[in-house]
Image (spheres, rainbow, N blue to C red):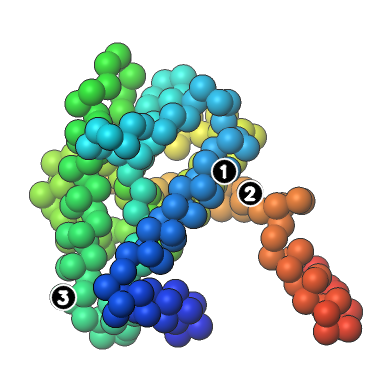
Amino acid sequence: MLIGNSLYGIIRDYYFQKGEQTFLNSFGRLFELYFEDLTSRYLASDQYIKLPENIKGADYKLEFDNVIFIIEMKSALLSIKGKQQNPNLNTIDDFFSRNITKAYEQLKSSCNRIEGKKPVIKLILLYENFRNIRMIENSLPEIFNNDKNCWIITIAELEILLVTFNTDRIKFDEVLMKMLESSADRETLLNIIDKLKLSRNLPFVGEYDYFNKNLKRLASELGTEYKPI
């Protein structure tokens, strides 16, 4: 846990103590750049639109044949205090209120300006790789009990959705159908992805397999044999 979070936390805390937003702003911009690179690889140029920054609302609109995604991106990470076995609940509540509640208000604002008959799905897109999205939804019943078209998803889940749209339109439509169901006990998107066996449709293959590329470079620098993972 410390290895996975400490580098981010050390840099964030350094700028926080200086009273600056430099790192957080840059990290958020890098998240946007990655999102734009991802969508440009898997969608046509007229399917993804960056919404105007001078109007209060969400960040992006993705338009498909039978549905529209409105996306508000949140690059913030939950403090390590909230990730312990006995987490600091105040830290978690603060993360939810600063990110999820604010994101939902921005999504609603953008949805109110959308015209047409296509259903709109609101997506709160997190950089944080939460495995238990249900915990967040249960903590904010005023949002998720009243708006079944609002979903929290991680960037990993969006990657799988876009790859599926590009490679298997039938399964992509299955995902959409389940997301549009107004069930009171709906599944999380991660559960839907697992049940449809989409988990292995990851985008980091071939020229985008940065992990093995860097391992190969490291092996070369260390003078050891490279074995792809």
Residue placed farthest to the left in the image? 142
Coordinates of residue 57 in the picture (x, y in percent):
25, 37
Which label's residue is closer to the chain start, 3 or 1?
Answer: 1
Front-most of residues 158 and 13: 13
Considering only vertical position in the picture, is 159 above or below 137?
above
**Residue count near mark 2 (Cα–Cα under 10 Å), binned few <14, some 14–19, many ≥20:** some
Q: Which residue is mark 3?
A: 90
Which residue is under mark 1? 38
Label of residue 105 in the image: none
Type of amino acid under label 3? Asn
Query: In the image, what residue type sits under mark 1?
Result: Leu
Q: Residue 24: x and y, percent?
A: 37, 63
Comparing 14 with 115, the one in front is 14
Q: Circles 2 and 1: CB distance less than 8 Å?
A: yes
Local packing at callout 1 (Cα closer than 10 Å; few below 14, some 14-19, many 20+) is: some
- Dot 2 or dot 3: first in sequence order is 3
Circle 2 sits on which residue?
A: 203
Residue 163 drawn at (x, y percent): 59, 41
